[in-house]
Image: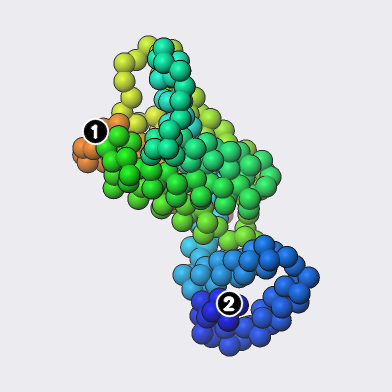
């Protein structure tokens, strides 16, 4: 099996480093359990795919995805948390007892719970295990969305955005895992995106409906804040938030009843925030005293 895994590497890299990778694997496999050998082979396969796609830690794409991964995890947790909140609000309002059936909606609830638990695990220090749980949960929610059809989001857009988020999360190079401060910022973003929408479902907020604007607005504000604190032009932060926004785009698409134009208007808040960051950066540079 390891021979097939090594073939996933680009040819030049395989010729240069293949024997070394094989030797390390064989040394590790002799003392590992079957599960350990499978995990080691999976790690090698993931590294090979990242090398072939150009998303390793040595490339700009890899570093960008590493920066986007914690915010994609947070966005997935906020989106799935909204599904759980909506279900719980319906349970509280209904006099019928809580029952679970072997259907797509129950599968969606379980997948959403797995995403939330995985996100909390990833953002509180156990990144690799949490990311795997998030990816599995997103894949499960995508399948549930396809099976349930219009009952849960859009049968095409919703699963596509879930799978795209899973790819962004899994593409993070393992040697560029996010630090505690970035994870804390991502967690705060998830809470800020989830809590008001949950309050809306609980009839606490004095507004009648939600069109998916709020989570994307929180995401755009997060990128703007990061750009402000780092005194950057905002291009990187805008790209990071764009890569992290698929769960919120799916939510906005559902909230706007599948109408593309309102969704495009809502999604524009992310690039607009980037343009604002660029403008503020330009004003800062103009306001600096010139050195002679």
Residue 56 seen by the camera: no
Coordinates of residue 190 in the picture (x, y in percent) = 52, 34
Q: Residues within 10 Å of mark 2 (few under 14, many from 20)?
A: few
What residue is rendered at 66% in x and 85% in y? 19
Q: Is 74 on the left or on the right of 204, as rendered?
A: right
| Residue, disc 1 | 257
Quadrant that contains the N terminus: bottom right
Picture coordinates of residue 134, whole percent (x, y): 53, 46
Residue 12 visible in rendering? yes
Are the residues tagged 1 and 2 within 8 Å (C-beta)? no
Q: Residue at x 54, y 85 (%)?
A: 12
- Establish if 69 lies above or below 218: below
How far across and down, in percent of the image, does residue 153 sit?
A: 31, 37
- Residue 168: x, y in percent? 47, 54
Which residue is depicted at the point 27% across and 37% down?
150
Q: Secondary structure at mark 1?
A: loop
For this orientation, the residue located farthest to the right is 31
Q: Examine the image and state in which quarter residue 119 appears.
A: top right
Which residue is at a point 35% across and 50% down the rendered structure image?
A: 160
Decide: is 152 above or below 242: above
Circle 2 — which element?
loop
Q: Earlier in the sequence, mark 1 or mark 2?
A: 2
Residue at which label 2 appears: 1
């Amino acid at each position: 099996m390891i021979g097939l895994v090594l073939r996933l590497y680009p040819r030049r890299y395989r010729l240069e480093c293949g024997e070394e990778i094989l030797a390390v694997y064989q040394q590790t496999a002799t003392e590992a359990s079957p599960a350990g050998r499978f995990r080691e082979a999976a790690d090698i396969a993931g590294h090979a795919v990242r090398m072939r796609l150009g998303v390793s830690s040595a490339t700009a794409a890899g570093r960008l995805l590493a920066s986007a991964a914690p915010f994609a995890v947070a966005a997935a947790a906020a989106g799935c948390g909204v599904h759980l909140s909506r279900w719980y609000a319906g349970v509280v309002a209904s006099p019928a007892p809580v029952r679970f059936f072997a259907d797509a909606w129950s599968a969606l609830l379980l997948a959403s719970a797995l995403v939330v638990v995985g996100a909390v695990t990833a953002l509180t220090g156990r990144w690799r295990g949490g990311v795997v749980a998030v990816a599995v949960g997103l894949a499960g929610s995508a399948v549930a969305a396809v099976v349930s059809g219009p009952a849960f989001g859009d049968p095409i857009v919703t699963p596509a955005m879930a799978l795209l988020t899973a790819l962004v999360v899994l593409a993070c190079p393992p040697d560029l895992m996010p630090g505690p401060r970035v994870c804390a910022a991502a967690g705060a973003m998830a809470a800020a995106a989830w809590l008001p929408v949950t309050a809306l479902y609980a009839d606490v907020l004095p507004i009648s409906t939600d069109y998916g604007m709020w989570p994307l607005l929180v995401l755009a504000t997060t990128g703007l804040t990061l750009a402000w604190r780092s005194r950057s032009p905002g291009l990187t932060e805008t790209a990071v938030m764009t890569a992290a926004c698929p769960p919120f785009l799916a939510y906005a698409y559902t909230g706007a009843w599948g109408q593309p134009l309102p969704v495009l208007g809502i999604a524009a808040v992310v690039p607009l925030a980037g343009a604002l960051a660029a403008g503020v950066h330009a004003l800062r540079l103009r306001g600096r005293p010139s050195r002679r």
